[in-house]
Amino acid sequence: MTVTRFAPSPTGYLHVGNLRTALFNWLIARKAGGTFILRLDDTDPERSKPEYADAIKEDLEWLGLTWDRVETQSSRLDRYAAAADALREKDRFYECFETPTELDLKRKKQLNMGKPPVYDRAALALSKEEKAAFRAERSGHWRFLLNHARIEWTDGILGDTSIDAASVSDPVLIRGDGQVLYTLASVVDDTEMGITDVVRGSDHVTNTATQIQIIEALGGSVPSFAHHSLLTGPQGEALSKRLGTLALRDLRARGVEPLALLSLMARLGSSDPVELRSSHQELIDGFELTHFGAAPTKFDADDLWPLTARYLHGLPFDAVADQIASIGVPVEVAERFWTVIRDNIGTRSELADWWQVLAEGAEPLVAEDDAEFVRTAMAMLPALPFDETTWAKWTAEVKNATGRKGKGLFMPLRKALTGRQRGPEMADFLPLMRALPRLHLTQD
Ligand code: GLU
């Protein structure tokens, strides 16, 4: 059975980069009829915050990326301690006492000599007495002893991948203050929770190599790994600094529709075209992990707007009925309102703007050259309420009276009645009007 997990650290808000990881793991689980676990990597007590954990859940709920269960690493510390003991017994875990400054110095020396900055394993040579002397001064941190061989795996996106373990430092798994680090916690969880497939960003490729050895040392079975490329901005620029502005909650507040965002992210960076999907099932059916490429993926938040608009334009009335009721549209005209307005909105919030125009009257938009014409036309406008014949009758009379025709006739009237250059068919719009434009005519 397929089991995947999305494992954010609750130290901030989710952004589009995290979403890619969440979505791929969710899609794999759902496609296989498997289990999707939300795992909160909260072993850092200082940076992890419950409000971020809540925000992560809220964002995933908004997107409809439902999880089958939640796990928290902070409640599994005894499991990590047991795994650390197991590694000690197998002589794959050793205590080190270098301070960060000493380690930094070692790295600088190695780099000066043109060598890769790999930890030199000096601690392995410490005698019992030397260790005891260090322990009296400071607590040690613990490293996993890598087996210096090539670590190989077939990556679900990168294909056959291998890393020479000798080019990587033995990873620190427990810090001097006792804090269990991500690599150990993650490996223990992946093994004990039966995770079968792990998709994460390509910044984790080296972690994967060391994690494979740790999993093997603990006698676990190695999941299938896949590393998706990292997102860049539209010009290929690094996105890392801007990810803060691409938080999912900000996109939500700006009116992005969940399925528009998911449709883009489920295809961006793959050989399949981005297609607007109207349900999660369609996303699942159209997802193929092997179609994704290793090259950095350009993300342009502006692509979300046409997708959002198209998604909205395709929604049936039932999908928006509650919202339309909540902005005060009377039930007897609600469906009509949706039919007339829907192709003219870019986000849901624009529904309220249109209703305001209809219910309270537009702030008219009148060019100086049209002021006289609009005044004449408005004087000929019959009293409310209007019906579906009003526009045709009125514009015919205005045409006769003023001699204007075509765009010169219709456009100023549209702008006067709606306050906008563009909008729905005026014949359909007029019967919905509850109020006339506010009569002090502004100029554009
Ligand atoms: N908490 C880790 C991260 O957010 C999880 C990485 C993983 O998927 O293993 O980078």
Image (spheres, rainbow, N blue to C red):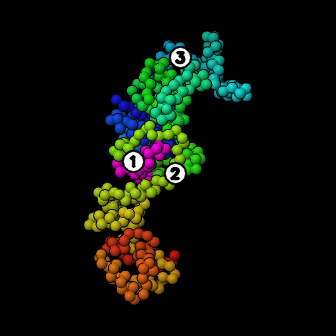
Specify whether 383 is left or right of 422: left
Seen as rendered, the residue at the extreme front is 271
- Is the shortest distance between ligand 1 and the CB of mark 3 under 8 Å? no
Q: Quadrant of residue 404?
A: bottom left
Q: Earlier in the sequence, mark 2 or mark 3?
A: 3
Secondary structure state at the residue bearing disc 3: loop
Q: Are marks 3 and 1 in contact (CB under 8 Å)?
A: no
For badge 2, the amino acid type reads Asp
- The residue identified by callout 1 is 62
- The residue identified by callout 3 is 92
- The residue identified by callout 2 is 300
| Magenta segment boundaries in residue numbering | 252-280
For badge 3, the amino acid type reads Arg
Residue pictured at 40% horizontal, 42% vertical: 287
Q: CA distance from mark 2 to mark 3?
A: 45 Å
Q: Residues within 10 Å of mark 3 (few under 14, many from 20)?
A: some
Seen as rendered, the residue at the extreme bottom is 401
Magenta-span inclusion, residue 423:
no
